[in-house]
Amino acid sequence: MLSDALFLKDPTVTRFLCGGLTEAESLLGSPLPSLPAPDVESGRAVWYVRFHPQLHTLLMRFLQALLRDIGAELPGTARASANGKEQADYEAALERALMGVDLVFHEAGIASVPRSLAEPVANHDVNATGTLKLLHHAKRAGVRRVVYAASSATYGDDPILPKVETMRPAPMSPYAVSKLFAYWMCVNYREAYGMFICNGILFNHESPRRGENFVTRKITRGVAAIKLGLQKKLALGNLEAKRDWGYAKDYVQAMWQMMQLETPDDYVIATGETHTVREFCELAFSLVGLDYRDHVVVDSKYLRPTEVDLLIGNATKARERFGWKPTTGFADLVKLMVDADLALVQETRKP
């Protein structure tokens, strides 16, 4: 139970550092299960949250909402820039930010395979080197616990399915390679220095907050625009690619639970179901009374030089160790995203 969270039993653990979004937002839908608000009178102090000034991520939006539910204070910080001096300033700022921090949810990074192909050096600097710097300074600062959002992309196209924690990695993009480096640095710091570091190996996690450069959100935003007469066609890449799509809110819940464990480990977080991009299109268009075949076209510019044809995960270890399982199925997830984009597009049309 979240109310029995490990750090709630320890009044000295009161501060978080979270990688990702820097502005507080409200959570769509029902709230995550709440933890009791901290009791200042009993010496638990005030929950204090500082945000890693790096690229924002989908998961961070849900974690912010969860932290806000327990009465956390949510101050933001400026985001880092790309030139050398400012990066040096950023690293110094990161070291200062980590001083006095107990728990780190590291979810920041470049999460786009196409962007990693276009900008492989920047991708490596943020995802790989950035994580190493975070771990280095976390160790120096005496951070007590770290949970890292690792990626299922590191498995690549190995034919053995479904994926579990011990399977051989075979990354097929600069993004996947950088995430694999970060994963193993987490393992290394855990084993070499005895740090509490968990890797959550997250399979595709979606929501209405997903960026429009991701195929799921591109589809649901396109469905809304076509339904409302703002466009006629939707150009996509490989319609036969199969993914294990889950709800980001569920995945944040898993990372939250990892932070409560007595001993750190690595966990696959996945639904155990796989669907094609074509299936996603078919369902999304059908929800607004349209046939995807009348609107979806394949454009070769969206095809990747190395494509992972099928990803599906097995989250048995997470279920057995801390009782995690997804609460939102594929059909409900697609409907949630289509409904949100219909409302968003309608709102933006208002004068």
Image: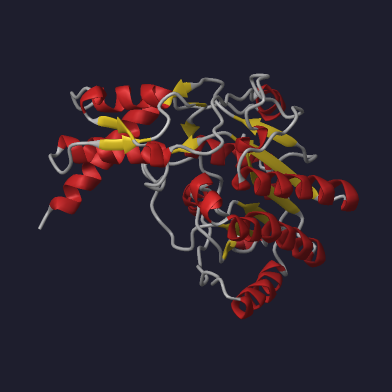
- Above or below 94: residue 143: above
Where in the figure is residue 89, as x and y percent of width and height?
Answer: 64, 78
Q: Residue drawn 70% across and 44% down?
A: 180
Q: Is residue 286 above or below residue 248?
A: above
Question: Considering the image in quadrants, where does the C terminus appear?
Answer: bottom left
Does residue 242 appear anywhere in the picture?
A: yes
Residue nearest the viewer, comparing 14 with 106: 106
| Picture mark count | 0
> What residue is shown at x 55% (from left), y 41% (from top)?
252
Judged left or right of residue 281, residue 230 is left
Please state, as top left, top right, bottom left or bottom right, where the N terminus lies in the image: top right
Q: Residue 158 at what x, y percent from top left?
A: 67, 25
The image quadrant of residue 119 is bottom right
Residue at left offset 70%, top offset 59%: 129
Task: Residue at 35%, 36% (x, y): give it.
Answer: 299
Q: How is the image coloured?
A: secondary structure
